[in-house]
Image (spheres, coloured by chain):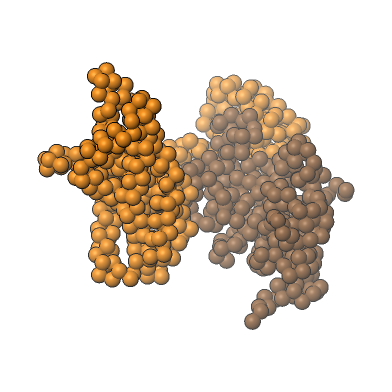
C-alpha cells in the first residue's frame, strides 16, 4: 500500500487523509508493506507528525512493514522527537488505567457519604462548642460582620420575600376558593390561608427562598475564600474559621428567618384579601376570620420552625463552603450541595415538627 | 515591513481605562525569544494582553504577521489570533478536564482531526513538555510548575507561530524555573516558534531572551531595548541599572 503525504501537512489536509486512509491501514497485516511517500512534504505541522507516529505505532502493533521515502527528513525528524514505543499505550489506555471498577466506585461513594456525615457532625460539634464559648464571652462575636450578614440575608431579601409571599396568598386563595364555592363556604378561604401560612407555608417558603438565595451564597463565598487560601491564612493567624466566618452567617440566618417569615405571612394574607374581595367577600369579614383562626400556638410554632430552618440553612451553607476543595468548579459544587442539603434537611425537619405538634396536640 | 518581523507594536498607549504606558513601539523578529521586562505594576502583562487581543490598547496599533490584532475587521482579527498561543501566569487550565482534554480542546474546536488523532497529537504535545505520564491527571493533582508546562502544551496545540508567555517562571523554585527555561528554548528550536515572554526573573532573562525591552512605571515609557547582556553591561539609565543589578530602594 502507498500513502503520499501532502506538500502542506496542515491540520485540514491531515484530517482528510487520516479519515480516508486509516480504515485501509487498520486492515494491514504482518505480510503487508506500507510505503510512505514524504518526498514532497514542504511543511509539517503537529498533525502531520501525529500521522507519522500513528503509522509507526500501528506498524508495531499490527506487524506490517513501513518503508519511508523521506528526501526532506520529515519522518526521521518526527521519529527522533517522539519515541514510538512511548506511544504504544495510547491515551485511552492511560486513562483506563486510572478508571476504576464499578464496585470500587460504589465503595468510594459510600466512604464519601460516610466522610460527609462525619464532617457535618464535626462541624456541628465545633459550632456548638464555639456557641457556648461565645455565650461565655459575647465580645468575641464579630458584631460588624453579623450586622452585615443580617442586612444581606434579611433586608436585601425583602423584595423577593414580599413578592413570593403575595403570590402565594393569591394562589392559595384562588385554588381553595374554587373548591369551597361548590359548598358555598368561600368565606372559610380566609381561615385556610391564615392557618396554612402561620403554621406551615410561611416558614417553609421563606426557608426555601433563603436556601436558594443565602445558603448558596454562604457556600460560594467560603468556597472562594478556600480557593484563594484566605481560610488557610485565618488558621495560620490563629483565628478559627468557624467563629470568624461561619458564626456571623449562621446567627444572621437564624435571627432573620422569623422576621422574614412574618413578612411572607403578611404579604400572603394581603394577596388573599385581594382575591376574596374580587370574589365579593368584604375585607372586614376576611380579617375577622383570619384573626379568629389565628392562635398564638400556631404563630409560635411557625416562628420556631422559621428559626430552626434558618439555623439549618446557615449551618449547611457554611459547612459546604468550608469543606469545598480548592478548584474553581468546587465552588459551584459547594453552592449546589448547600441548596440541596438545606432543602432535604428543611423537609425532614418539617416532618418532625408535624409529628411532634400532632403528638403534643398543638 | 521586513519579512522576518512577526509582531509590530506601533506607538501603543497601554492600559484599561487609565494609560499605564504611552508611546510604546518595537518589533519582534521571527524565531527570537523576546522578553518584556519591568517592575511590578509597570504594565507588562497589560501590554501582553493587548498583543493577545484580549483588550484593545487605548491608542496605537499592534500587528501579528501583518494582521491587526485589534481594530480592523472581525476576519482580520480572527486570522491574527490563529497565529499565536498564550500561556497564562497561573496556567489557567480547566479544572474539570484532564491535561489531555485541556490540550485536546483547541484541536477539537478548530480542526477536523478524528478523535484518536486528536488524542495522539495532544499526547505528543504533553510529551514535548515532559508530561505525557500525567495525561489523565486533573490540574488540581499536579504542581505549579507542571501546570505551567501543561499550559504551554495547550498553547502549542494548534502549532502557533508565536507563543506569548505571561510570567512563565513566577513562583517556581530555581530548578523548576531553569527546567522551564530549557523547555522554552527547546520549543523554539524544535518548532521554530517566536516567543514573547513577560518576566522579571533575571535568571530566566539571561538564560533564554535574545532581545528585551524594559518598561518603566513612573515615566510610563519604554526605557531601553536590546540584548539583556548589553543592557546589563551598558545600562542607558539608572532605572535599567537598578533592575539588572537588583538595587533596591530603602
Which residue occupies 40% across, 68% down?
A236
Q: Position of residue A342 (x, y in %)?
A: 32, 44
Most distant residue in the right direction: B1
Most distant residue in the top direction: A182
The one nearer the camera, A182 or A354, is A182
Q: Position of residue B32 (x, y in %)?
A: 76, 55
The one nearer the camera, A193 or B121, is A193
Quarter placement of the C terminus of chain B: bottom right
Residue B27 shows in the view: no
Q: Position of residue B91 (x, y in %)?
A: 57, 52
Q: Which chain is brown in the picture?
A: B
The one nearer the camera, A292 or B170, is A292
Residue A20 shows in the view: yes
Which residue occupies 59% across, 21% down?
A24
Q: Position of residue A279 (x, y in %)?
A: 36, 25
Which residue occupies 60% across, 47% down?
B153
Horizontally, residue A71 falls left or right of residue A34, namely right
Above or below residue B183? Residue A10 is above
Q: Classify residue B79 by image quadrant.
A: top right
Above or below residue A64? Residue A254 is below
The one nearer the camera, B241 or B133, is B241
Which residue occupies 59% across, 49% down?
B151
Tell me the colour chain A is drawn in.
orange
- In this rendering, the count of numbered labels is 0
Horizontally, residue A359 falls left or right of residue A235, namely left
Horizontally, residue A77 falls left or right of residue A201, namely right
Amino acid at each position: 500500500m502507498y500513502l503520499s503525504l501532502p506538500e502542506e501537512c496542515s491540520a485540514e489536509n491531515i484530517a482528510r487523509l487520516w479519515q480516508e486512509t486509516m480504515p485501509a491501514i487498520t486492515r494491514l497485516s504482518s505480510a503487508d508493506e506500507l510505503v510512505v511517500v514524504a518526498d514532497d512534504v514542504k511543511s509539517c505541522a503537529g498533525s502531520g507528525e501525529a500521522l507519522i507516529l500513528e503509522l509507526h505505532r500501528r506498524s508495531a502493533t499490527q506487524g506490517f512493514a513501513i518503508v519511508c521515502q523521506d528526501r526532506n527528513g520529515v519522518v526521521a525528524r518526527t521519529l527522533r522527537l517522539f519515541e514510538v514505543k512511548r506511544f504504544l499505550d495510547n491515551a485511552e489506555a492511560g486513562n483506563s488505567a486510572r478508571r476504576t471498577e464499578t464496585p470500587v466506585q460504589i465503595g468510594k461513594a459510600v466512604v464519601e457519604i460516610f466522610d460527609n456525615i462525619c464532617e457535618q457532625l464535626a462541624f456541628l460539634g465545633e459550632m456548638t462548642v464555639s456557641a457556648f464559648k461565645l455565650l461565655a464571652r459575647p465580645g468575641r462575636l464579630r458584631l460588624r460582620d453579623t450586622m452585615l450578614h443580617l442586612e444581606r440575608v434579611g433586608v436585601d431579601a425583602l423584595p423577593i420575600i414580599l413578592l413570593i409571599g403575595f403570590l402565594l396568598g393569591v394562589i392559595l386563595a384562588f385554588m381553595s376558593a374554587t373548591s369551597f364555592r361548590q359548598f358555598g363556604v368561600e368565606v372559610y378561604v380566609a381561615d385556610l390561608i391564615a392557618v396554612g401560612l402561620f403554621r406551615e407555608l410561611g416558614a417553609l417558603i421563606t426557608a426555601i427562598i433563603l436556601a436558594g438565595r443565602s445558603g448558596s451564597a454562604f457556600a460560594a463565598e467560603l468556597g472562594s475564600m478556600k480557593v484563594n487560601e484566605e481560610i488557610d491564612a485565618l488558621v495560620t493567624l490563629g483565628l478559627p474559621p468557624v467563629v470568624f466566618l461561619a458564626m456571623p452567617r449562621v446567627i444572621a440566618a437564624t435571627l432573620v428567618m422569623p422576621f422574614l417569615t412574618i413578612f411572607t405571612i403578611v404579604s400572603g394574607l394581603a394577596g388573599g384579601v385581594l382575591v376574596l374581595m374580587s370574589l365579593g367577600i368584604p375585607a372586614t369579614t376576611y380579617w375577622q376570620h383570619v384573626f379568629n383562626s389565628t392562635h398564638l400556638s400556631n404563630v409560635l410554632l411557625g416562628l420556631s420552625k422559621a428559626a430552626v430552618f434558618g439555623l439549618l440553612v446557615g449551618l449547611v451553607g457554611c459547612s459546604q463552603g468550608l469543606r469545598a476543595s480548592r478548584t474553581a468548579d468546587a465552588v459551584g459544587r459547594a453552592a449546589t450541595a448547600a441548596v440541596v442539603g438545606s432543602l432535604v434537611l428543611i423537609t425532614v425537619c418539617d416532618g418532625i415538627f408535624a409529628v411532634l405538634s400532632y403528638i403534643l396536640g398543638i | 515591513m521586513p519579512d522576518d518581523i512577526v509582531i509590530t507594536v506601533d506607538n501603543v498607549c497601554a492600559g484599561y481605562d487609565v494609560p499605564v504606558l504611552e508611546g510604546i513601539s518595537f518589533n519582534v523578529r521571527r524565531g527570537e525569544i523576546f522578553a518584556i521586562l519591568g517592575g511590578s505594576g509597570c504594565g507588562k502583562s497589560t501590554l501582553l494582553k493587548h498583543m493577545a487581543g484580549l483588550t484593545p490598547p487605548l491608542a496605537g496599533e499592534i500587528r501579528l504577521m501583518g494582521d491587526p490584532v485589534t481594530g480592523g475587521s472581525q476576519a482580520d482579527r480572527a486570522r491574527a489570533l490563529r497565529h499565536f498561543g498564550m500561556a497564562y501566569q497561573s496556567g489557567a487550565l480547566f479544572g474539570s478536564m484532564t491535561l489531555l482534554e485541556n490540550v485536546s480542546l483547541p484541536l477539537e474546536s478548530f480542526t477536523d482531526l478524528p478523535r484518536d488523532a486528536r488524542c495522539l497529537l495532544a499526547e505528543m504535545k504533553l510529551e514535548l513538555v515532559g508530561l505525557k505520564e500525567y495525561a489523565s491527571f486533573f490540574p488540581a493533582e499536579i504542581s505549579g510548575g507542571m501546570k505551567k508546562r501543561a499550559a504551554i502544551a495547550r498553547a502549542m496545540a494548534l502549532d502557533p507561530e508565536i507563543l506569548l508567555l505571561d510570567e512563565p517562571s513566577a513562583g517556581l523554585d530555581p530548578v523548576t524555573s531553569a527546567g522551564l527555561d530549557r523547555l522554552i528554548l527547546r520549543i523554539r528550536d524544535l518548532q521554530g516558534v517566536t516567543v514573547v515572554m513577560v518576566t522579571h526573573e533575571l535568571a530566566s532573562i539571561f538564560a533564554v531572551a535574545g532581545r528585551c525591552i524594559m518598561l518603566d512605571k513612573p515615566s510610563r515609557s519604554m526605557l531601553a531595548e536590546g540584548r539583556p547582556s548589553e543592557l546589563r553591561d551598558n545600562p542607558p539609565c539608572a532605572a535599567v541599572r537598578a533592575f539588572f543589578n537588583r538595587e533596591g530602594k530603602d
